[in-house]
Image: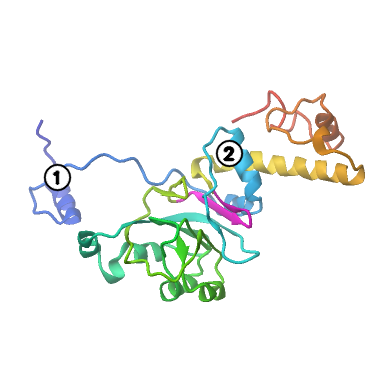
Amino acid sequence: TLLILPPNMLSTISRRLSLPVGLTTKRFATGPAAGGSISDDLLEKLGGLSTQALVDGLWVMGWPCAQITGARALAPGMKTVGRAVTLRFVPARPDIAQQKPPGMESPEYEAFELCGPNSVLVMSSVGPWESVGGDIKFLRLQQLGLGGLVTDGSVRDTDEIINYGFPTFSHSTTAKQGPAAMQPWECNGVIECGGVVVRPGDAIVGDQDGVVVVPAAKAEMVYDIAHGREVIEDIVKEELTANPGPPGKFYPFMSGKIKPESPLGQLLATKGITPENSNQFEGKANW
């Protein structure tokens, strides 16, 4: 089948692909990189929740594991929330090193310039002990006011990165150079980081327990479930503090499965939380 395109469209395609006019090439189909958008207000609310509550919220929705394996805070007290800007590394190979756009055109610097205070740069390494960067490169991220950095690899120049002030979560630290093992290859595509798929624009939330990826398309529902769980957990803890005893009377519980007649259901009723106003009860799950 011959596909005939208008001349103006051919010219545009040729410019973008650096091909002579009249010469086109077939590309494999891919889905969209981003899966939705998250407002600043929702991003702030997600950042107010613990990573545990977010994991629990995604779990009851039947979502795959959302915690990035091995990504831990570089220093105590670090917490981050932001929209994902993604960067994928590939194993080093001579032709990869030669054909990767050089200098300022490199995919890693392209990713850097997309970052700001509401961004978390997620860097997919080829191995947990390989360096994704350090002092000189990451100075630019500090200048841009980066909201956070997450990688399933390692970082170097640890003291300098901590001094830069942006929250950093990595598998570990290393003195090794990265270019000998891998090269940055793609900015803002769909990546796998620590066993979790990350799409550009997903919400990334990190605290002392780890880093969780909240899919942009499901962020509002995840917040609703997770926030509801945290409210209930606070009530349970308050009750057990006032009346010490085994937590099994009230806990654990599953969102969308609480029975109104159960001890937990009765306790929540005294606080004004009922099946009429909460999706945490049996038969009220809306996900």
Q: For the residues carrying marks 1 and 2, which lies nearer the camera in this image?
A: 2
Q: Is residue 97 left or right of residue 273?
A: left
Residue drawn at (32%, 66%) of the image = 180
Check disc 2: other Cα within 10 Å, few if <14, some if 14-19, many if 20+.
Answer: many
Q: How is the image coloured?
A: rainbow
Residue 268 on image: x %, y %: 82, 35
Q: Is residue 223 left or right of residue 235?
A: left
Marks 1/2: CA–CA distance: 41 Å
Magenta region's main secondary structure?
A: strand
**Amino acid of disc 2:** Leu
> Which residue position is annotated with label 2?
58
Q: Nearer the viewer, residue 215 or 51?
A: 51
Q: Where residue 254 sits: x, y (%)?
A: 69, 32
Q: Earlier in the sequence, mark 1 or mark 2?
A: 1
- Whether 163 is among the magenta residues is no
Q: Nearer the viewer, residue 176 or 117?
A: 176
Callout 1, which amino acid?
A: Thr
Whether residue 209 appears in magenta in the rendering, the answer is: yes
Foreground of the two, 93 or 11: 93
User: What residue is rendered at 33% in x and 66% in y?
Assistant: 179
Q: Tell me which segment is drawn in magenta.
A: 201-212
Image quarter of the N terminus: top left
Q: Which residue is mark 1?
A: 25
Q: Secondary structure at mark 2?
A: helix
Give the residue at x 49% y 49%. Answer: 202
245 vs 10, left or right, is right
Residue 160's label in the rendered image is none
